[in-house]
Image (cartoon, helix red, strand yellow):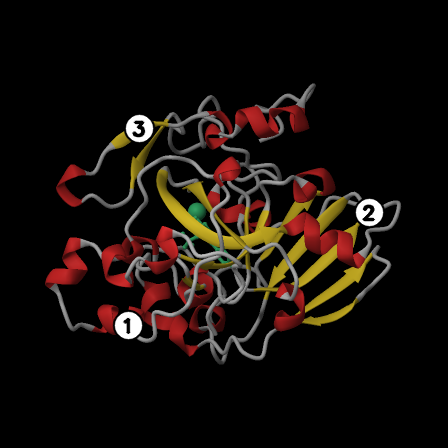
Amino acid sequence: MTYRFTTELRYSDVTPKSLWLNRRQIMAGGTAALGLLAGPSMATTPPRNPRYSVKDELTDYDDITSYNNFYEFGTGKDDPARHASSLTTSPWEVKVDGLVGKPGVYAFEDIIKGVNLEERIYRLRCVEAWSMVVPWIGFQLSEFLQRVEPQAGARYVAFETLYRPEEMRGQRSRGLDWPYREGLRLDEAMHPLTLLATGLYGEDMPKQNGAPIRLVVPWKYGFKSIKSIVRISLVSDQPETTWNMQAPREYGFYSNVNPNRSHPRWSQATERVVGGGLFAKRIETRMFNGYADEVASLYSGMDLITNY
Ligand SMILES: Nc1nc2c(c(=O)[nH]1)N[C@H]1C(S)=C(S)[C@@H](COP(=O)(O)O)O[C@H]1N2
Ligand SMILES: [Mo]
């Protein structure tokens, strides 16, 4: 499936896909990577929303899709790109339950019908102190939450990834306590920056990046942005989250990007920008990953060192 939702054509809509390929891919010409991107180039990219897009240089498509964390496919950074092709992403359903007026099982096609699909360029900062800049395609989670009608008493949103060990080899061994789970406070979930993403670089979401639908919360460490979502629950109490259950001293519920609070095993003051080969650089990590103007008010009065 490709996107055909945009109403007006812009320059970027008609830019050949080949311009997105970096030098390495072009030099590797005719490889599988190139084949993946080939095909009809009639599809148009939803319009970019500059209000929520950073100006930073984009990370190359091949870095975004080959250096991943997706433990369902293994713990190595290259495991998701090697093994995620085994995942069936169509048909896809998301179960919505808990404190909502419209619980039910929503088909992926139904979820994205009529939403404000747009492109947004966000920084992604991993807790392991590397970062990327990704042109996501998606829509605000708030749009979907409003549609399912949160009830009074709903204070948190809980998310789950699918459990399907036949297709997700990492789930055949213990590893994490499956399914992968994440959660947000309802006001964080309703914040305009919080996206349900269905693609990147103008393409449907690659499987290793969380096809067909994943969360993106750019002011929090990457692990909060749960992939391949099959369940969204509105709940009254703070939900359990995978990394917090795994190592509570290392990963808190909030996990806001914070250069002032070191991870117990390493500093969070700087980060390595993924890609660039020889020119890889380290930059200073910014409070809330650079989104302080938009999100700091969500946490006024909270101690963000103890509430990590
Ligand atoms: N279901 C699931 N979602 C997940 C993960 C995972 O292992 N399983 N890893 C998280 C981590 S640690 C990061 S840094 C981001 C990485 O997203 P990316 O691979 O698209 O860059 O996905 C997050 N979402
Ligand atoms: Mo991460």
Mark closer to the chain start, 1 or 2? 1
* Residue furthest to the top: 301
Amino acid type shown at disc 2: Ala
Tell me the tag on residue 283.
3
* Residue furthest to the left: 27
- Callouts 1 and 3 close, C-beta under 8 Å: no
- The residue carrying mark 2 is 154
Residue at position x 48%, y 66% in the image: 3
Q: Secondary structure at mark 3?
A: strand
Position of residue 154 measured from the top left corner of the image (x, y, whole percent) = 82, 47
Mark closer to the chain start, 1 or 3? 1
Mark closer to the chain start, 3 or 2? 2
Spatial CA span between label 3 and label 2: 39 Å
Tell me the tag on residue 38.
1
Spatial CA span between label 1 and label 3: 34 Å
Amino acid type shown at disc 3: Ile
Task: Say whether residue 240 is left or right of residue 133.
Answer: right
